[in-house]
Image (cartoon, grey):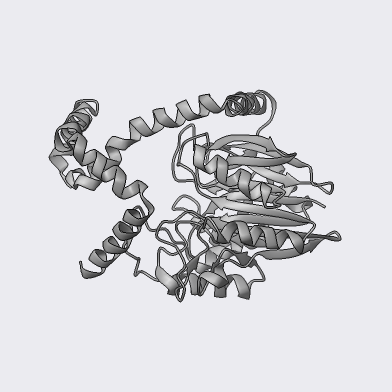
Amino acid sequence: MSIIIGADCVPTGNNEDKFISGKIDEILSSNVVEVLQKADFRLVNLEMPLTGLNNKISKCGPALKASPLAINGYLNMRINAVTLANNHIMDYGSDGIRETIDVLNANGIEYLGVGSCKKDARKPLYKVINGKTICFYACVEHEFSSAGENKWGANTFDGYDTYSDIYSACKDSDYTIVLYHGGKEEYRFPSPELQTRCKNMIDCGADLILCQHSHCIGCYEIYKNKKIVYGQGNFIFDLCDDEYWNSGMLVQINDDFTVDLLPFIKKNNMITLAEGEEKTELLALLDNRNQLLAETSEISKQFIKLSSEQIYSYMYKISGVDRSLMFRILNKVSGYRFGRFYIKKRYSKQDMLNLLNYIECESHREIVITGLKSLIEEA
């Protein structure tokens, strides 16, 4: 048995034409193509709808889509299934999801992680591969793609339902693989809460947890003899050119359910398996992060550092000032010190305590979420 799992696989302006024409050899090097061809089963994260629609939803962040004809690229990669539980699959509404599903069905590619309602979206995908029943379960953190009780969307993580789903799925399979779409983008470690969630999934019976969405190679740990990968990086997502986006990992599951990580790099818009010094360096950096991950206090420090840097950006947006061109110019010219000064003047300590309470307390948070949705509908 050989299963290959890739993370975000997205046609962009640089290569959508190659997806449409099926010219995968102009996107993937021969060593990556060989790995895909030798596998018994291949799954990736389809991080956008394949639709011709133009009516994107109101949301935070960019709306992504590709032509339905881009399916030719997935076919020539011999992709067997895709997870649609991600934060972009709803970018063009329920019609966009339905069109995507129609395209997948018409071309014999299975999917999981979305549905016409929350109950439907929670269904796992079971596959018998070389005599072993493998369960794939996919979920995503809450953003703008969440399924509702009677609403199309993705399967969002839930503190009760997700663990219950995994526990039930394990009873009907030899191995259970969880695809969790979440974590902080361009951050190579899990948050303390994400780490707890993933360990709880293992406690419920999962055999492998793969966290996607971060757009960078993260780290991994072994918990109860099961592997948790916190960040695969992208697979094909040629949107940025930096240290985070220019490398990633394919995950290979073998017949004895050992898990191999296959690092790759992006060069000249081509994905190629890392070899020689480049492979050695990527694996050495991965190992260093794994060692840090084993130190609970260090991971907490890393996350506090990240949060203390990011909180200003979050609060700019909450205050509404981030829309001001003058503010953004002054902030950039000052090395972002102006923004920090503004936030500290804009919010008193009591304001920040109130905001923390509204976000941290479950009852207050539920009111804030429901109330904001009502305001958005009225806007």
Q: How many marks?
A: 0
Q: Residue at x 46, y 49 (%)?
A: 14
Q: Position of residue 280 (x, y in %)?
A: 67, 24
Q: Residue at x 19, y 48 (%)?
A: 320
Task: Look at the picture and state if 303 lies above or below 99.
Answer: above
The front one of 285 and 239 is 285
Horizontal side of 134 relative to 112 (left or right) equals: right
**Image quadrant containing the C terminus:** bottom left
Q: In the figure, residue 167 lies in which quadrant?
A: bottom right
Q: Residue at x 44, y 41 (%)?
A: 240
Q: Position of residue 325 (x, y in %)?
A: 16, 42
Q: Position of residue 214 (x, y in %)?
A: 50, 43
Q: In the figure, residue 368 lies in which quadrant?
A: bottom left
The front one of 343 and 331 is 343
Horizontal side of 37 relative to 296 (left or right) equals: right
Seen from this angle, which residue lies furthest right? 131
Residue 246 visible here: yes
The front one of 253 and 343 is 343
Task: Look at the picture and state if 245 lies above or below 154.
Answer: above
Horizontal side of 56 relative to 138 (left or right) equals: left
Task: Look at the picture and state if 32 lies above or below 13.
Answer: above
Task: Look at the picture and state if 336 lies above or below 96.
Answer: above
Q: Residue at x 62, y 75 (%)?
A: 106
Q: In the figure, residue 353 lies in which quadrant?
A: top left
Q: Position of residue 88 (x, y in %)?
A: 45, 58
Residue 232 visible here: no
